[in-house]
Amino acid sequence: MPPSPSSSLPALHSPASALQWDVFCQVIDNFGDIGVCWRLCAGLAQRGHTVRLWVDDSSALDWMAPGARQGLWPGISVRAWEEAADAAKLRDLPPADVWIEGFGCHIAPEFIAARADFISATAINDIKPPVWINLEYLSAEDYVEHCHALPSPVMQGPAKGWTKHFYYPGFTQGTGGLLREPALEAWQRGLDDSWRGAWLADHGVAWSGERLISLFCYEPAALAQALADWMRSDTPALLLVTPGRATHALAQALPQAEAMTGKAPHNSPLRLHYLEALSHPEFDALLHCCDLNFVRGEDSLVRALWAGQPFVWHIYPQDDGAHADKLAAFLDCMGADATVRQFHATWNGLPPIHNAQGMQTTPDWGSLPLEAWYQQVQGWRDRLRRQPDLVSSLVSFVEKRR
C-alpha cells in the first residue's frame, strides 16, 4: 500500500530562504482549528521551513499526528500556549520571520513586546518585524476575494506601526487556495484495485464488496431517515462510523430508524463498523476508500474534495443561520446540480429545494445517483488542482514582503 503523502515529512528541498514560522492556535471545539493549523505546519516543514506551533490544547495531536508532541516530526516543535507569555522562556527564543494567528486568535502581548524590544535593541542591524498574518476561515462567499491579503495597520501597543495581513483560504484564483500536499497526485496515481481492500483489512474492517460510506458529522437532521433508507435499500452498504460526535449522533438516530423500518441493521442490507480515531494520513485514506463520504467543518471538506469521491458536507451550524449562506456559496462556486444541493440541504436541516413544478422533493438516501455525483466532484477537483496550494501561496506572499 503506498504511504500517504502526509504520513511523513521529508523536506522536498532545503530552500535558500528557509524561514522560521510561529503558528498560533486556540482550540475552540471539534478539532478543526488544530487540524488545519497542524496541516499548515506539516506543509511548511515538508518544504524545508521550521515551525513552532503554539497551542492551548495539543491533546488531539496524539491521534492526528502521533509523535508531534514528543518532537518526532522534523522541523516542527509544539509549544504550550502559556509559554508565549513567559518572559523567561522568551528571552532566548530565536525570533521568527513569520507570525500566523490561526482563525482570529490573538498572540500574547508579552510575546509581541519581547519581539518589539528585541528589534529596538538591535536596530543598528536593521532587524525587521515579522510578516504577521491572520489566517481566516475557509469560505466561498464573495467577500473573501475582496478581503484577501488586505493590510491592517497595528494602531497601538508595542507593535504600533507594524502591519498584519488578512489571509483567506479559498476555492478561486483570487484567494489563498487550499491545503494540499505536493505529492498528493502522485500518491493517488499509485492506488490500485487491491489498495482499498488492504487498507480496510489493516483497520479491522471486514468488507465483502458492499457500498462503503464514511460518517464524520455533527448531529445531522436527516441521519435517522438516511439510516432507514439504507436499511430498506436493495444495495448493501457498510457504514464506517468515526468516533466522537458521529458515534453519538448515530446512537441517537438508530432507534428512530429502527422504528421507521421495523428492523435492526443486522437484519437489513446495512452494516455498521465503528472506527478508532484516525491520524490525518489514515483519515485521508478512509475518504479515498469510500464510495460516499459524509464530512464536516473545514478540514475534512477539503480532504473530501481531494479524494474525489461523492460527499455531503455538514457545515458547522451557527445560531444566526449564517451557515446556510455559506453552504449555498460553496455549492454555487462548485456549480453543484439540483440533486447535490437537495441532499446537502436535507442533511443540514435547511429548507428543501423544490422541483420545476414547485413540488417539495425528498431525497432517497438509498438511491443515490453516485455516478453523476462522482463526475461532478472529479470536475471540481480538477479545477481546484490548477490553483496554487495554500502553503505555496503563503510562502510566496511572505517572501515578497521580507
Image (spheres, rainbow, N blue to C red):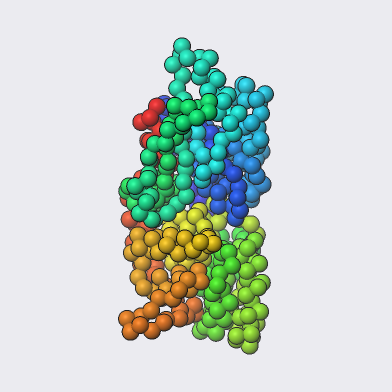
Establish if 303 lies above or below 93: below
> Residue drawn at (60%, 50%), measured in percent from left and top?
28
Is 80 or 376 nearer to us in this picture? Answer: 80
Quarter of the image for residue 161 reads top left
> Residue drawn at (50%, 33%), measured in percent from left and top?
99
From the top left corner, tell me how far across and down residue 341 is, in percent: 40, 70
Establish if 250 lies above or below 318: below
Is 189 or 359 nearer to us in this picture? Answer: 359
> Residue drawn at (35%, 60%), measured in percent from left and top?
333
Q: In the shown orientation, is residue 223 left or right of residue 187? A: right
From the top left corner, tell me how far across and down residue 281 is, in percent: 54, 51
Q: In the shown orientation, is residue 250 left or right of residue 182? A: right
Establish if 283 lies above or below 55: below
Number of dots carrying numbers: 0
**Furthest residue toward top:** 124
Q: In the shown orientation, is residue 164 left or right of residue 400? A: right
From the top left corner, tell me how far across and down residue 29 is, in percent: 61, 53
Answer yes or no: is residue 378 visible: no
**Furthest residue toward front:** 156
Q: In the shown orientation, is residue 104 left or right of residue 172? A: right
Q: Quadrant of the C terminus?
A: top left
Establish if 291 lies above or below 181: below
> Residue drawn at (32%, 81%), measured in percent from left and top?
356
From the top left corner, tell me how far across and down residue 199 is, in percent: 56, 60
Answer yes or no: is residue 124 visible: yes
